Image (tube, rainbow, N blue to C red):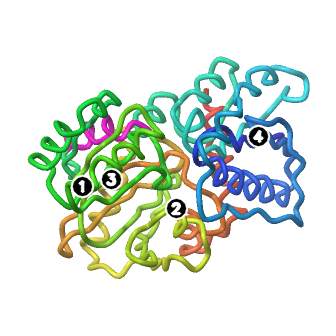
Amino acid sequence: MKIAVLFGGTSAERKVSIASGIKIAEALLRRSHQVIAIDTAGGFVQIDLKGNYAVGAIPPDEKSLSSLDDRYLTTRLNERDLADLDVVFIGLHGGHGEDGTIQALLNLSNVTYTGSDVLASAAAMDKAFSKMVFKLNGIPTPEWLLYRSTALNDTNAAKREIISTVGFPLVIKPNAQGSTVGLSIVNSENEIAPALKLAFEYDSRILAEKYIAGRELTVAIVGDYDLPVIEIVPEGGFYSYECKYTSGKSKYICPAVLPTDLAEKCKQLGRKAFDVLGCRDYGRVDFRLRGGEELYCLEVNTLPGMTPTSLVPKAMKAIGIEFDELIEIIANLAVRRKSEK
């Protein structure tokens, strides 16, 4: 097939996306597909199968991201070198790649692409909106408050409301970011203002969410495959950006050691969260487990990472499906949808 792989972009997850995009492109090349690799903020990229790319321990700073422009794709999408594509494989994370913007552009250009459509992408990226949908559908999720940047005009009022409504410990994070970018775990009143300031550096809306002490679990979803629950045990107890993308910084237990009925409940809730947001093809649903029995859904990731430490590939490997085949399966899910139109 002729496949374009999109990656890079301008979000704070740019480095992760580059790593994912390179791995996706490499896998498709090994499967003998014709691959066009595109950094949406930089142009066409030659993939070196002998190369290696590391994400690093910290996300790119806002100054370096502000110098990038991801409108490149709009000027090239209908040109000859992108004609007759069988599918676009979206390897972007965060920003316009995951919020439905790129998906809308591809829809207008009548191009088939992997992953969720415009509405599901936007709904999942908006954490507050997705949590409202979870609550309406009986999916447990931590209590939260949503703030706009005007909250910085009166942080004392925000502090009072957060303490009385959410309580300690709590999490303050951007409403539409991933990879724990801009996230803080807050244990006291004097930590609230700096956490708000950090989160607002990455988004104009932020969440103050109840912190659920307990185990970190995730459910990978690929088509109709029945995948095991994964437990994440990060170094130091916090699954930070560094722990996510630095080999050896986190331990992954797949399948997670859980009672059979609890593991099944987690998988069912994961599939339900994925479905109520209208997601398709593949994704990942994150949970916290409190007290050995209470599950809380945190969010749905519609474009989860495809780096060497990523969780969807680990879940597929646990049932005997290697990375290259996983990438082929995802591409074929989109192509099949195209043929059924």
Whether residue 278 is visible: no
Query: Can you identify the residue that label 1 sits on?
Result: 190
Which residues lie in the magenta part? 125-137
Query: Can you identify the residue that label 2 sits on?
Result: 241
Looking at the picture, which amino acid does disc 2 mark?
Tyr
What numbered label is drawn on residue 298? 3
**Most extreme residue toward the top, as rendered?**
108
The local crowd at label 2, few if under 14, some if 14 to 19, many if 20 or more residues have their Cα within 10 Å, is many
State which tag comes first along the sequence, 3 or 1.
Answer: 1
Eye-nearest disc, 4 or 2: 2
The local crowd at label 3, few if under 14, some if 14 to 19, many if 20 or more residues have their Cα within 10 Å, is many
Considering the image in quadrants, where does the N terminus appear?
top right
Task: Find numbered disc 4 in the image and state the secondary structure of the residue it sits on.
Answer: strand
Looking at the picture, which amino acid does disc 3 mark?
Leu
Q: Is residue 195 magenta-colored?
A: no
Q: CA distance from mark 2 to mark 3?
A: 17 Å
